Amino acid sequence: MRTTFAITALLVPASAFAQSFDITSQDGVTIEATPIAEFNEPWAMTFLPDGELLVTEKPGNLLLVTQDGTRTEVSGVPEVAYAGQGGLGDVVIGPDFAESRHVYISYAERGEDGLQGAAVARATLSRGDGDPALENLEVIWRQEPKVSGNGHYSHRMAFSPDGEHLFITSGDRQKQTPAQDMESALGKVIRLNVDGSVPDDNPFQDEGELAQSFWSVGHRNLLGIAFDGGGRLWTHEMGPRGGDEINLVEPGRNYGWPVVSYGVNYSGADIPDHPTRPEFEEPEAHWTPVISPAGLVIYSGDLFPDWQGDAIIGGLSARAIVQVDLGEQSDGTLASETRRFPMDARIREVEQGPDGAIWALEDRAGGRLLRIVPAGEG
Ligand SMILES: [Ca+2]
């Protein structure tokens, strides 16, 4: 009988379990989420032009997923350093994907002496007659220097709206002070040409070769980066104990970590707030207690017309989807949390689907892919 039960369970399609559920924000807005598929430590996703998704799993798997949850493994992923916060990271498609089929992945890689660092590779996503594969994979960026530990790689990616440049978040690797060091790529936002070469119009031209790849400095752990409809670049980053931030990122600016923060160190030692040091950029909004932001999309769809231009952020410790208005606020900043939806799970990643639905990935083993629409429209 046991065998029969097991076989029966395997034959039931995943969609049979896809019971939609409603989530209501504290201000009474209700959304409806439908589970589409489950993953093992999903980390990032992106949509292809045909509406299928690429989903990464931190242990090193890349999956091609249809909107009804059918998954196919994509071969050709390089070996990743899977430990702690490290492993396979982000996935984005190239601006010219329709012609080139270029896919960019980020991941943690091992170096010598047990040291590790983030890397970004570009490959061609082949379909052909067989299973999907990454081909002609080429590493186009390596986070320098490799260091010990396996936290704060960041390695999230976004392309500029004109398709000319790739932006990569490079976390401080929990080493803090390198974020202010122009001879270290840790704690920076990186700007490259789409082939990985360094543009000659980046802001730090006279501070050494490595610094020529920097767009902004003084960052901690940035798990979200996105351009808004007006071409402005936004990132969020995790503070230490308190002090999560959303920042409008402009070239050549210094965002202050670890000299200033609205948080305090895990040791309990205070860190001066931003206004004490006007040479550093103030975040547009900050959170204490933290939300642990992961994943960022600036909404532009029609399903939630009132949300156009808002930032949608996954919250790990907040176990929520956090909506942030990006516009002139009464306190002079450009961002303010509007509402949050309690998801009863750590949210690792958010995306906007082709029809304007919001898609979210829960964190950790068994993390579900959720399709989210206004309540009653599922
Ligand atoms: Ca994504």
Image: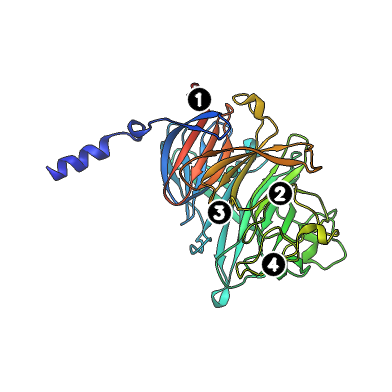
Ligand 1's quadrant is top right
Mark 3 vs mark 2: give the one in front.
Answer: 3
Looking at the image, the residue that sits furthest to the right is 206
Amino acid tagged 4: Asp
Rounded to the nearest angstrom, the CA distance separating label 4 from label 1 is 43 Å
Instruction: Nearest to the eye among marks 1 and 3: give it.
Output: 1
Asked whether disc 1 touches disc 3, contact meaning CB atoms under 8 Å apart, the reply is no
Q: Earlier in the sequence, mark 3 or mark 2?
A: 3
Q: How crowded is mark 3: few (under 14 residues within 10 Å), some or many (20 or more)?
A: many
Three-letter amino acid code at disc 1? Ala
Q: Where is residue 348 in the image (x, y as percent from the top left)?
A: 53, 48
Neighbor class of circle 4 (other Cα within 10 Å; few <14, some 14-19, many 20+) is some
Q: Mark 2 points at which residue?
A: 166
Place of residue 197 in the rendered image (x, y in percent of width and height, measured from the top left): 74, 56
Q: What element carries label 1?
A: loop
Crowdedness of circle 2 by 10 Å Cα count: few (<14), some, many (20+)? Answer: many
* Label whose residue precedes the other's in the sequence (4 or 1): 4
Read off the residue under disc 1.
375
Residue 103 visible to the viewer: no
The residue under label 2 is which amino acid type?
Answer: Leu
Is 284 drawn above or below residue 341 in the view shown? below
- Answer with mark 1 or mark 3, whichever residue precedes in sequence: 3
Helix, strand or loop at label 3? It is strand
Q: Is residue 119 left or right of residue 74?
A: right
Q: Is mark 4 on a helix, strand or loop?
A: loop
Q: Nearer the viewer, residue 210 or 20?
A: 20
* Ligand 1 has an atom within 8 Å of the beta carbon of the residue at disc 1: no
Task: Give me the residue at 70% from left, 57% from top.
Answer: 262
The mark lying in front, picked from 4 and 2, is: 4
Residue 270: mark: 4
Q: Mark 3 points at which residue?
A: 89
Foreground of the two, 31 or 207: 31
